[in-house]
Every structure is written in C-alpha cells, then in structure tokens.
Amino acid sequence: MAGYVASGILYGGIINAPLKKLGNCRKFAITPNATIKKRTSKMIGTYGQVLDSASMAEPAKLVIEMDEWNTDNLRDAAMGTVIEATQEAGNDVEKSFDLTTVEHGGYYDLGKRRVSGVSVTVASVTKIEGTDYELDAEIGYIKFLEHIGSTGSAVVTFDCAAIAAGAIILGGTESTIKRHYLLRAHNEVDGSHWEIEVWEATLKPTSETDYLADDYSVLGFEGEMNTPTGKTSPYETRRFPAAA
C-alpha cells in the first residue's frame, strides 16, 4: 500500500454526449455526506445520553477547480450555451453612415471584425485616420471625429479576414448544469492507475469569472451527484496496479 499524490486528465461533457478533455484540473474532490439521527434520553439517571443512533446517507459533494480557459469550461462558468462564430473573408465591403445623425466620439459597428485596408470617403473625398476617424480593427468599430463634419454620408470600404473557429458563449441561458465526468489519474507514489467516473453531476459555479485577471484564475464548481437510471451508484472509483 502507498500514499496518494496524483496527476490526471479530466474528461467531461454534457449528459449522453461525447466526453472532451477539459484541460488542467487543479482539484477533483468528492466528500461523502450523511446526517446522524439520534434518540436522546430524557430519563432520570441517563438524561442527555444517546440511546440509539443511525447514519443516514445524503448526496456526496463534488468540487472541481479548473484553470483552463477553454470554451467548455467557460460555458459552464457562465451557465450558458455555445454557438459558432465564423466569418467569411471579404474584399471591398462597404458600409455607409449618415453624418447628420452620427454622434461624434461614439463608436459604430462595421458588422465585420478583423478589418483591414480601411478607406473612408465623404462626397468622394478620402478622409484621414486619426484626424477624421479612429478605428478598432480587431472588433470592427469606427469612431467619427468632429473634423469629419456633420453633413452627407461617410462611406467606409474595407476588407475582412476569414474566421473559421470562433465561439460565442451566451451567458445565463442554462438554469441547470448537468455533466458526466471521467478522471483518469496516475498515483505518482506507486504508479497505480485510478479512474473516477461521475455519471451525472448537478453543478453550480462557485467563483467569479475575471476577464481582466492579473494572474492565472480558477473556475470553480461544486454540486451533488445523481444515480441515473441503469446505475447503482452515483460514481465509481476504479483502481488498477501499475503496468508491468
């Protein structure tokens, strides 16, 4: 027998869907839970003593800590859903703005991101970036400055890059998080192989999601484990000796 110091790989996913590697998992802890029921004496001579007691099992607690900021972990931290965010490459895309209604100093959406080759014209006169307008090319936002004037239309022409693998997380769209987990662990002490599989966990986020963190931040979750139909326990722990 040996102590336990482990490294591991955590797989997880939506119930009845394929599992995915979730990245660096800092904690995967299960705490059994129970309530002690007792019958206490009120009789003379034994007052306050326990006459009978029983331990009544309750759902075990699962705690997970992740420091990998991938789409799946952030989706769960936001209690949200994920949709694809793609963009086809474009050349000489045009968008016009009515300068009589434009608020100088305000940013306006070009409808595309990662824009380049931007040209702004008013009455066929080319305007100058930094003097007449400012641009955030990554998100595709333009700001018109007072120098551009308040009459006519500004015609913005630009190219945009193709984006094939973006994602949008719609936060707060899921009222319940239910996940299936499989932790593959390696005991660094004796080389034994461990598997902890949770068939169905109902979780809630326990940490803030700091999008301006100065250091590596943790996405925390906790909850209870359910015993789904066809299973006899909410989770399994499997141990195998080190490979020969």
Image: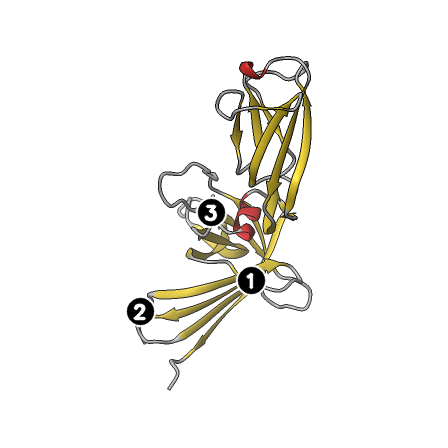
Residue bearing mark 1 = 20
Is residue 55 among what the camera can see?
Answer: yes
Q: What residue is pinned by disc 3?
A: 220
- Mark 3: amino acid: Gly
Front-lying residue, 26 or 127 = 127
Mark 1: few, some, or many residues within 10 Å (few <14, many ≥20)? some
* Residue 21 % position (x, y): 51, 62
Q: What's under tag 2, amino acid-wise?
A: Gly
Q: Earlier in the sequence, mark 2 or mark 1?
A: 2
| Image-quadrant location for residue 155 | top right
Bin the neighbour count of mark 3 within 10 Å (Cα to Cα): few under 14, some 14-19, many 20 and up: many
Residue 124 locus on image (x, y percent): 65, 24
Q: Which residue is mark 2?
A: 3
Q: Secondary structure at mark 3?
A: strand
Give 50 or 221, whichever is nearer the viewer. 221
Where does residue 113 sit, x and y in percent of width and height? 59, 39
N-term-proximal mark, 2 vs 3:
2
